[in-house]
Image (cartoon, rainbow, N blue to C red):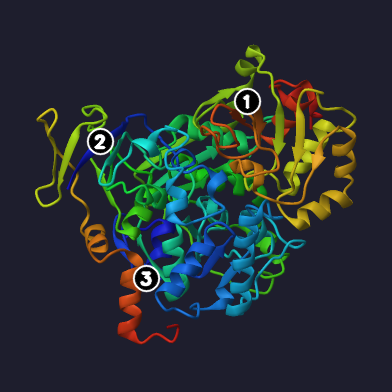
Amino acid sequence: MSQTITEKILARHSGHDRVRANDLVNAQIDLIMCHDVTTPPAISMLKSIGVHRVFDPTRIVVTPDHFVPNKDIQSALLAKILRAWVEEQGIEHYYEIGRHGICHALLPEMGHILPGTTVIGADSHSTTYGAFGCFSTGIGSTDLAAALATGELWFKVPASMKIIADGLIPHGVFAKDIILEVIRQIGVDGARYMAMEWCGSTIDSLSMESRMTLTNMAVEAGAKSGIIAADETTRRYLAEKPHSKNRAFDAVQSDADAHYDQVVHIQVDQLEPMVALPHLPSNGVGISRVVKDSVVLDQAYIGSCTNARIEDLRVAAQVLKGRHVARSCRTMVVPATTSIYNQALREGLFEIFTDAGCAISTPTCGACLGGYMGVLAEGERCISTTNRNFVGRMGHPKSEVFLASPATVAASAIEGKIADPRKYLETP
Amino acid sequence: MIGRAHVYSRPHINTDEIIPARYLNVHAEAELAKHAMEDIDSEFVSKVQPGDFVVVGEDFGCGSSREHAVWALRGARVAGVLAGSFARIFYRNAINNGFLAIECLGLSEATSSGDQLEVDLASGVIINHTTGATHRFSPIPDFAREMMQAGGLLKSVEKKLKATGSPGS
């Protein structure tokens, strides 16, 4: 009987020939991602139940990213606990400040994520890794502790939603606009508990970076995972990355007649740039309607696991080149990882950003979750390339966050109000 | 179990509202409890009493994977969350912690803050002693019930490792 890619991966990792949606399985975990906020509680839990060794230190990747460089004394302690634990356990894949990055950008670019595998991360945006054709989901600290101890975890096999995206992407429209449109259509719980599986001619044409923007925000539709089967683009990407270049992998595909609980078609050539209005990612509106309202901004933010990879920074630089951000709209650029930072520097993007009046920082999740490095005051408005615009997400509960692509954020920074990026981008 | 209701019927109450990220630099439950539900109701902590229930609408706990959301509520001595539905990571975290999370569609609309609720797990009903109404809730899945009864995922891992004499322990 036919299966989806998600069912096949979970079946193979739980000793079954096949599984179906809603089956409960205990799956072997190939890779575990740990960061500075959710891992220290798991470390305490492991100690409390007398587990002194993790199941396999080579299958664990650790990077501090949320509150580093340390935002305060308490977060310094979290980072210190994490570092000491890494040393104690002999975990080789640890990315200290200076080599670190936002986990969901860092693990793929280092080649830790392989098709056909199972990945968990103690962070909701761990759905990102599914862009590589693996099953990947976000979990809490207790799950993390259990998986670190045993190398396996319980799952209810998710039903799948197929999203077929077809058509050429119009000028000024990016992966972010596609995912905001899909979430607008299905709602923030439209894919609750499901695997969002992407396919179609548009997906085939997307870079790995853009695919990651789609799977990153699967959780914003309530999904358990996002997934895109590996193809030539995936192979080429992995062939260049340090930890994947010499590794074989199993590029699992869905069967043609696999069952989907829901199928969503999206015709991409009809899209325009999207902005999700406060306070839900599903509040997407086309840019031509938003600009009519003249939404004045206090801050523009280009960063996060959603949109701070090199192609995002290139687009933002294309918009900002030779221009200046509005005096009333402070603008931050936070490359997602150290290597993206270095590449942007080499490509001359930093000069464009600083000439335009942007502040640039070392990688951190910081402002995206209202931690630090760009927190909003009461009544302030920010347009952001991040993934959530919930109440209080980037600071004061009475601040407002608008979600958009790097191009739209950069264009809006120039005008100090939400702006259409298309007039600032060269036509191809 | 009997406790008072604290009702927030809006759907999609997210983990940033349950425990804002600005407090994630600690994970002690007593510390987190001081800020439980702060961004949806800054007075929640002063009103809540041990054994009370949080009664909410659909998709409660959407957003981040922070288990701190469950710990903050448990730290505030909340007996459980009665929701129209739950976002998956919050629900998973609740089960793993043995924290009561019950799905009861329409309960938040039919309940007022301060109502005296009784949750009868054996018969699967919630009785509102203030209004006299009875609400049947969705049965807790067997595996979740077993996990809750075992005291959570960590306890069951501990038991399993002891049984197999794992090299890790």
Residue designated by label 3: A14
**Gap in Å between the C-alphas at discs 3 and 2?**
41 Å
Type of amino acid at the residue the image marks with label 2: Ala
**Front: mark 2 or 1:** 2
Is residue A231 or residue A87 the one in the foreground? A87
* Label of residue A88 in the image: none
Q: Is residue B36 left or right of residue B81?
A: right
Residue A78 lies, in percent from the top left, at 60, 61
Type of amino acid at the residue the image marks with label 1: Glu
Q: Secondary structure at mark 3?
A: loop
Residue designated by label 2: B5
Is residue A383 or residue B108 the one in the foreground? B108
Q: Quadrant of the N terminus of chain A?
A: bottom left
Q: Is residue A103 visible?
A: no
Q: Subunit of mark 1?
A: A
**Residue for point 39% across, 39% down:** B45
Q: Quadrant of the C terminus of chain A?
A: top right
